[in-house]
Every structure is written in C-alpha cells, then in structure tokens.
Image: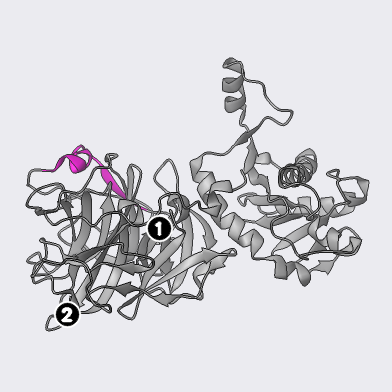
Amino acid sequence: MMKCFCSLALALLSFPIWAAEEPFDRDNELFCSSINTYGVEKGLSLYKRKQVIFFRNDTAYVVAVSKSSELDPFWVAGELEHLPVDDQFAYDDHADKLIFSSVGKLYYSYWKDNGWTNHKRLKMEGVNLKVTHPFNDALSQPEKIQRIYHPTFAKGGDRLYFAAVSKGRTDLDLWYADRGPEDTWLAPHLLPVNTDANEEHPFVVGDSLLYFSSNRAENQRANLYYVDLTEEQPVARISVLSSPSSDEIGIVVVGDRAHLISDRCPTRPGQVCDDNIFKAQVVRREKKEAGISFKDIPETFPKDVASPYDVLPYVFRTMTEAEADSALARGEKLEHDRLMRLDSVAKAKADSVLWVALNSVDENKRAQMLTSNVAKTESKVIFYFDSDDDHLNDKYATDLDAIVQYIKSEPQTKFLIYGFTDERGTDKYNQNLSVRRAQSVFRALRDKGVPTSNLLFTGFGERGLVVKNAKTEDEHQKNRRVEIRKM
C-alpha cells in the first residue's frame, strides 16, 4: 500500500535565492513519489545510465527517472546483495566502479563478468596510507579521520566527496579527495563550510553545485543546504527544497529533476512521517570547473575506459497511433509492426534487464518442460527455437493460448520478451536473430489479442548462455530461446 498520494507546497524562505534555485520560487510544488510504501526509504544514489537506487528495509531497488520526474519502479538490485552497502554510495560510470561505506570504512568494487567483484578496502593518503603528495592544508588533518560515510563522485569520478567523523569530534564534516595512482586516493581536504553540527549526504551537480544535509538550524532539523563551489569563499545557503519542520537527508539530481529523502508528511502538513522520497524540478546546470582555492591534482585516471553498458541492446515497443501519424507526417518509413526504439529512460532500465537476464541462467537449468519446445520456471516462460530459425510455428499454439490468458489476467502488468541464440554465428548476426525471435513471440501474442502496451521485447544475442561451450545439438538448443518475464 502506498503511503503518500498528494503534493506538498514548497516552504519558501526569505533569503536571496541563488540562480540554480530560482525555479522553486515560482509556485512550484514538491511531490511525494508514488514508489513510497510504509517502509522507510533511504540512501538515494546515482547508478548506471542515470538510474537511481534507494534502499528500503536493507534491500536496494533500481528505478529510472521518467519525463514526469516520477521514479519508475523496476528491479531489485540483486547484484548489490553481497556488498555490505550502508547507505548512499558513489558510482563511477567511466570505470564501472562502486565506492561505498560499511561500518564507517570505505570500500570499492568493480563490475566484472556481469556482477560486482568482492569488495576491497579503499586506500586514501592520510587516512590509511602515508601522505606522499604535497599537502599544505593544515586545517584538514586527514590522519584524524576515524569513520567515513556517504561517498559521492564529481569531476567524472576523479573527485570523491564524503562525510567523516574525526578523532575528538562527534559530528560529521564534509571532505573531498582527488584520485591518485591505481586504486588509491590522495589526502583529503576539509571543506570550508563545516560547522559544529552534522554535515552529511553530499551530492554534486555539474562539478560546481554542492548539496548536503545539516542540522545546524536552531530547531536541530537536518535541512538541505547548497554551496556554489566556484565562489572564492564558498558560503552554505539553505535550499528552498527544505521545510523548517522536517528533515531532508539526501538528494539526487538527474538532468533537470531532483529527488530527496524527507520525513515530512504529505497528507498532514506540519507533521512528520516515515522517510519518503519526494520529487521536484530543477534547472539544468552547466558543468564548470570548481573554484576552491587549494591546488587541484593533475588527472591520473584514463578517460577512455569503455563501459560494457555502452553496447546494451535496445528495448522495442509498438508505436502509438499518434506516434505513427507523426512519423508518417515527417515522411518516415515505418516498419511492418511500426516499431520504434524507446527513449533514454527505457534505455536506463535496460541495465537492470540485462543483469536479470544474464544472471538468471541457473534458473533455466531447473526449468520444468511443459512440451518438447516450451518450459517454465517460477518467474518466466521459455520457448526453444530450431537452429538459425526465428519462426513460431503451429506447435506452440496451445502454449500460447495459456500464456495469453495469464497475461490478460494482469492487465496493468508489463511483460518483457527477450531472445537469445547459441554461440554459432557472428556477434552481429546473432544479435539480429535474437531480436527477430523475440519479435516472433511478440507478434504471436499481439495477434491473439494481447495489448501491445503490455509488451516490450529485445534481444541479447549469444550473451546469457545456459550452456557455455556447447557441443551437442541438445546443449545448443538450451541456448536458442525466448523468455517472457513479468516486470
């Protein structure tokens, strides 16, 4: 059951609003996201392809930001389950690297072979390594850092911001460190905006706008503040996203949309509830070099590291009538099924689709055969194809009828159809063949009356092999398949 249904007007405060926050001063509203439940939401973080991850009851969920600023629910982030992530983490999309805090210490992990590697302790000069580079910031004293939390990246993964507790203190302060050689980080610097209160959950937009939470206000509430890092003397200003009567404990900005964690109550203004995710529109901020007074360390990390997610398959759907009419008016040639590629939000979902597909092959080995060509597991139905064939012939008719009834019984649910091939053939040919196989199932379900708005399809080529290095025809056929999964 959802715990919030309505919008909440922003509390505007009487101070000069910096340019990046001007849109909030024009009768804007902060809306409670529809993905909230009676559980507690926390730990907003950016993830692959501008997806957002949040935690609920220690389970991580992957969502994509839609055009309406809503967070579109998708998959449990099962790939993170073996990592002891405490809260907000930092994801570097240049190197497919994750940095997170666990019990006050920082760790890192790399994406490899369709999963995150076992985590290792992050090495940082002054904290757990000897300082080897020039370090003249006497106020920082990084050797006194005892516990670190809430890491987030800036400057394309070359700068790491975080909150930390130092020896002799009980409050959290904001720091940043630059990337060093290999998997090390240079000695961190204390930001000049800290107070005797807690400063935590930093998030940087465009390398020059820093958001963070702090309970420095008289009422001890953890309000949201922002800092223009290009100023010679950076000053922390309270954000109009904050409410004096509630806590704001984390923010993520994707393009021109912001999401934050707050305990404000959407149905009873002035009262608090469990921590919810709220959404708002922000102006897109141009990326520019931060102007903090200390000397920047030269870049040491290669920028040409390619992510495997640059070659994700496209997810397809049929055009709506309006989209088809618009395309025809522009003189575009339409394919037989009037297919089109999804927008960037749907592509962001493809990260999670790919992970689930490639990491569910063990499930196929336990599949129960319904006929000689169709099998099922607890979460999906599997069609098997002949070699180099993408046709769904009459022998599938009975099985299709049962699947059609199942899909029609859940009219609000979308189903993803994805195809695979065996290892024989070129990568390009197999990718196209896998899409054609998924398309055959898509068409067969459509022709039996399943609304196309309920169906998406894609292909993964020879990725996701159930039997690797297959030799017999029976082993190859376990790889030649189409799977239908409820989303």
Q: Secondary structure at mark 1?
A: strand
Compared to residue 268, the image places residue 392 above or below, namely: above
Percent x, y of residue 287: 28, 42
The Cα atoms of the two marked residues, 2 and 1, are separated by 27 Å
Q: Is residue 189 left or right of residue 417?
A: left
Please identify the quarter of the rendering in which residue 142 is found: bottom left
Magenta span of residues: 17-32
Tell me where residue 157 appears, x and y as whole percent.
Answer: 35, 56
Residue 93 drawn at (x, y percent)? 43, 54
Kind of residue at badge 2: Lys
Q: For residue 227, say whether it is visible.
A: yes
The chosen color scheme is: one colour
Q: Residue at x 21, y 54 (%)?
A: 210
The residue tagged 1 is: 92
Q: Residue at x 33, y 42 (%)?
A: 256
Mark carried by residue 144: 2
Type of the residue with mark 1:
Asp
